[in-house]
Image (tube, grey):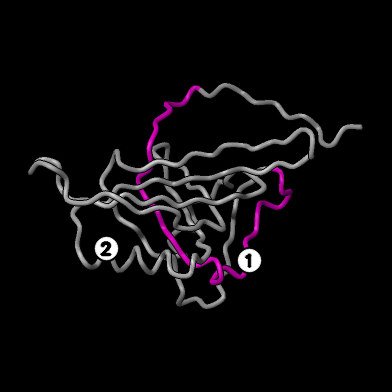
Amino acid sequence: MSCATLQTITKSCDNNSGGIYTLYVNQQDNIASITTDETGTNWIVDGITLTDPLDVFVPIEFRRNVGSYTEEANIDLINGSSYVTQTINLMLHRRDQEKSKAIKVMGAGQQYLAVIVGDANGKFWYFPFMQVTAVGEGSGTTRADGSKYSLTLTAENEFLAYEVDPTIIAGLL
């Protein structure tokens, strides 16, 4: 029995860059629905409806070369269960009370967050049901170290992150 038709993966000729440049976060409870492309085969989010249009996504600003995401499939062949562990790591430079408060609010009550990540290839990715799972760092040891926070968001979802149509981003902010 075949579950789905296999699809071709073609080699890209485009430049491939790593890292993330932007991150937008919202409370998962503020997401009324998402819509994907008409056929549902491209895995592209082409609409996100908020429960209240005033509860928009909030940007989390960070320096370049200090943020990344990973997705790792967890497949149990015996039990027939599969899920993807999604992890976003950020380094936020220069500790201050505004950042401390923002991090505390994001992690309050171990709430679920909806996150949109913009990567170095100009693609945006949707990560639902993320949670703050770690916060660390401090003053550094030497003056050159600088003070900072490390922030980790993690989710366990059924699918890899969906690509987001970049034309809808401005309407979510």
Which region is colored magenta?
13-41
User: In what element is the residue under mark 2?
Assistant: helix
Q: Which quadrant, please, contains the C terminus?
A: bottom left
Which residue: 40% across, 52% down? 134
Determine whether, in the image, residue 36 is placed left or right of residue 93: right
Which residue: 48% across, 70% down? 109
Amino acid type at circle 1 is Ser
Q: Is 89 or 26 nearer to us in this picture?
A: 89
Residue 22 inside the magenta-drawn segment: yes
Q: Is residue 101 above or below residue 158?
A: below
Residue ID for mark 2: 99
Residue 87 inside the magenta-drawn segment: no
Q: Of tags 1 and 2, which is closer to the observer? A: 2
Q: Which residue sits furthest left?
A: 143
Q: Earlier in the sequence, mark 1 or mark 2?
A: 1
Q: 10 Å neighbourhood of mark 1: few (<14), some, or many (≥20)?
A: few
Which residue: 20% across, 57% down? 95
Image position, residue 151 (x, y; %) = 36, 52
Marks counted in the figure total 2
Q: Which mark is residue 33?
A: 1
Residue 48 location, quadrant:
bottom right
Q: Is residue 37 above or below residue 141?
A: below
Which residue: 44% across, 46% down? 88
Distance between the alpha carbons at the discs numbered 1 and 2: 29 Å
Q: Which quadrant, please, contains the N terminus?
A: top right
Image position, residue 4 (x, y; %) = 82, 36
